[in-house]
Amino acid sequence: MPPGSTLDLEPATAAIDDVRDSQKTTCCVVGGGPGGMMLALLLARQGVPVTLLEQHKDFDRDFRGDTIHPSIMEILDQIGLAEPLHQLRHAKIYGPTLQIANTTFNPIDLRRLKTRFPYIFLVPQARFLDFLANEASKYPDFRLVMGANVEQLIEEDGQVRGVRYLGADGTHEVRAPLVVGADGRFSRVRHLVGFEPIKTSAPMDILWFRLPHIPGDLPEGEGRVLGGLGVGRILTSFLRATTRTCEPPGWSRCVSRSPRLSRRLPST
Ligand SMILES: Cc1cc2nc3c(=O)[nH]c(=O)nc-3n(C[C@H](O)[C@H](O)[C@H](O)COP(=O)(O)OP(=O)(O)OC[C@H]3O[C@@H](n4cnc5c(N)ncnc54)[C@H](O)[C@@H]3O)c2cc1C
């Protein structure tokens, strides 16, 4: 926001008397997804006091990504985290395999990239977030509050001065000169300040589910992305360390058409 401007905030609803405690920090980040977690880690590394508020009690949500790409791994390497990240159970993918009609081909070979990490690193996003949270907690200026559902902004003189969140035991306050809304696509913070997102992407339905491994799958540590294209449909299958996940619309129809995947369906 331009300096000196004020916000047209949604009116607060919780009585201030109900607030159990008020903490002060320099930056309050709302949302412990990859964006908020990484920002909080980087600030804490620089000695900036930061409080990260995440509404869920853990990061274990299935509807999350799995892939870390070479450019991200290089950034992690710059802050010394690529090597420890590789200690987590993971798989590597050197390029996707596409199936069109009855032919498969490999359009991209990441091994040609000039990087120490010429592969897509597959790890469940929940484990990646646990890892970042653990790294951030090594810095004294980092504070993470799980189960903290941000409901209101604290506004004084038309400026945001912090947030109020609902925890298991009631309402709490975090006061900070800088509040960052990293609370995802349906951001409550964005809604509270009245920002309207500009829609740029075409609507798309994604169906996301797991299928079990079967004998003959790739050995542990080797990953694979298989893609199939149809009219108005894409089937993508990630073979990762523990399970295979796919994201096709109309999953049973797609799976039953793919010989590789239909073998994984329970027999009826
Ligand atoms: C099915 C699927 C598969 C994907 N696969 C990949 C992939 O393989 N690789 C990849 O790089 N990307 C992938 N993505 C995209 C990736 O998940 C997103 O780009 C990324 O999660 C965005 O991060 P974020 O931190 O901005 O938001 P989010 O991950 O949405 O995090 C927002 C966080 O804010 C919290 N929150 C929301 N409201 C509040 C509140 N009021 N108070 C406190 N906390 C709140 C939420 O609980 C959440 O943890 C995938 C996305 C989907 C949906």
Image (cartoon, rainbow, N blue to C red):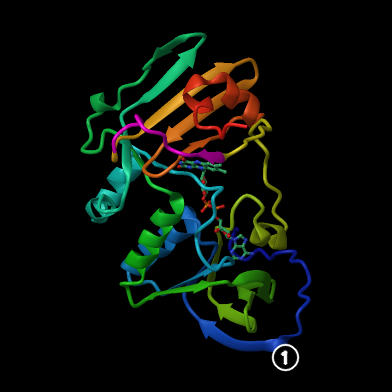
**Label 1 beta carbon within 8 A of ligand 1:** no
Residue located at (66% from left, 63% from top): 5
Residue 10 place in picture, x, y as percent: 77, 66
Q: Is residue 78 left or right of residue 215?
A: left
**What's the magenta bit mostly, secondary-structure-wise?**
loop
Crowd band around label 1 with a 10 angstrom C-alpha radius: few (<14), some (14–19), many (20+): few
Q: Looking at numbered disc 1 in the image, what kind of residue is underneath it?
A: Asp
Picture quadrant where residue 239 is located: top left
Q: Mark 1 points at which residue?
A: 17
Q: Is residue 152 left or right of residue 241?
A: right
Q: Which of the two residues, 240 or 114, is positioned nearer the viewer here?
A: 240
Q: What stretch is highlighted in magenta?
A: 209-219
Q: Which of the two residues, 191 or 131, is positioned nearer the viewer here?
A: 131
Q: Is residue 229 left or right of residue 89?
A: right
> Is 183 rendered above or below residue 222?
below
* Residue placed furthest toward the top: 102
Picture quadrant where residue 242 is located: top left
Residue located at (59% from left, 88% from top): 21
- Which element type, helix, strand or loop, lies under badge 1? helix
Residue located at (44% from left, 43% from top): 66
Residue 146 place in picture, x, y as percent: 52, 71
> Is 88 rendered above or below residue 208?
below
